[in-house]
Image (cartoon, helix red, strand yellow):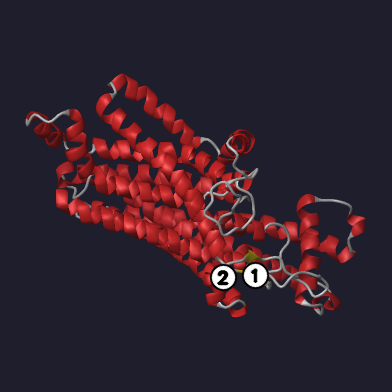
Amino acid sequence: MPTSTVFITLVALCLVSFLVGRQRSRIVATAAGGMQSLHSLPKHYGYMTALWAGLPAMLVLIFWVALEGSAIRGLIVAEFPAEIRALSENEIGLYYNQMVSFAVSGGDASMLEPTQVAAADFYNELLVSSGKLKLLLVVVVAVLGGALTVLRISPVLRARNSVESTFTWILFGCSSIAVLTTLGIVLSVLFEALRFFQTIPVQEFLFGLKWSPQMAIRLDQVGASGSFGFVPLLVGTLLISAVAMLIAVPVGLMSAIYLSEYATRRFRAVTKPVLEILAGVPTVVYGFFAALTVAPFIRNLGESLGLTVASESALAAGLVMGIMIIPFVMSLSDDIINAVPDSMREASLGMGATMSETIRKVLLPAALPGIVGGILLAVSRAIGETMIVVMAAGLSAKLTANPLEAVTTITVQIVTLLVGDQEFDSPKTLAAFALGLVLFFVTLLLNIIALYVVRRYREQYE
């Protein structure tokens, strides 16, 4: 019995429980003298019944699914011949996986040992039995939970309080999952980065001026010793991000001011969604645009002016990245400017100020915290962009501030280091986690600055 079928059955039982609980509350209310005798509305009794039918059964289903695989594996391995069970754990795993592949997908039985074919039949029998037991247990728990709740329904039962308390705990659980997931990601990156710093000193990574991670991974390979200086990647990332923000911030902010203060409602209603479509264009499309159109144009323009321009340059990547971020800055700024109270705008105009004076001296200062926060979020997005840089800026880690040269960024190097089959005991591979850790702290710092600016200046205007 597939888990999806069990889940659909559970949802159906919850729906039935809701209807039964609600109807039961109405019967109890009629016997007690009317609906006013109930502590809560009938729907709250229905919700409570559905929750107590669904939540315990859902927990049972989750635990069953989590333990089902290991339990079946243990039963099957116990049936293997003694010579198979005497093999190493990896060899037993390979033997078991071959059997599971045959049991699930089928194939030529002559390619397997008779023991594996028999184990495959046993595996399918266990899956069928497990599915039936899983469905039976979930149904029993759900029905039992719903029935006990229905029996508890009385006029004095605080169903609404129980439902709200249960939903509070559900929301708390969801929040905890999000926080713990983030913590787990950070810790996994941190531990791998610490392994890298056991080989490469921290000061060499943070202050080194050369990035060349090519080195021998295995003893039978010939390669350089590798150089892991982080500074060229940081400079390349900041250079491309600076070019992008020089394009995105003025254009996005001016567009937002025009749409919010000068454009007609009809023009704004049409233009803003159209511009926001740009935010949904895949970054690989921007990468094509940068590599096939913008980069050749910049190179030809530079050559006509007597400048030396690389085929892939930070300027091309930054320009296209800026175009990509314009809708992001524009949309955030437009929403923030429109959120300024009309009373401030009307008071300024009533005092005789022109529209431009009102914008410069009233609206923008009032909206400044949100605008700065939005710009810093846009910077975080620019720092994390990868595809455009790969296609338009190249992979060369150069320590230069010239936007006409090819550079690379942190995210691109992370992708490069982790492409293909890699040995995770090599500093070359572990360097990706060190780069990810630094990138995490950079974006975290930007978000903290954005929150500080928003809170600091929000107090001033409240």
Front residue (pair 434, 247)? 247
Circle number at residue 383:
none
**What residue is rendered at 32% in x and 50% in y?**
373
The answer to whether 368 is drawn above or below residue 286 in the figure is below
Q: Which residue appears at 22% of the width and 56% of the height?
A: 456
Residue 159 appears at what percent x and percent y? Answer: 26, 53
Does dot 2 land on a helix, a strand or a loop? loop
Mark 2 neighbour class, 10 Å CA radius: few under 14, some 14 to 19, many 20 or more:
some
Residue type at tag 2: Gly
The residue depicted at 15 percent of the width and 47 percent of the height is: 37
Residue pushed farthest left? 351
Answer above or below: position of 460 versus 60: above
Q: Pointers 2 and 1 in contact (CB under 8 A)?
A: yes
Q: Is residue 287 visible?
A: yes
Q: Name the foreground residue: 120 vs 460.
A: 460
Tell me the number on the disc at residue 227.
1
In the rendered image, the residue lying farthest to the right is 110
Q: Look at label 1 and name its amino acid.
A: Ser
Helix, strand or loop at disc 1? strand
* Residue 262 image point, x, y percent: 26, 25
* Residue 208 disc label: 2
The answer to which of marks 2 and 1 sits earlier in the sequence is 2
Q: Position of residue 3 (x, y in %)?
A: 59, 51
Q: Is residue 178 visible?
A: no
Position of residue 443 measured from the top left corner of the image (x, y, whole percent): 43, 58
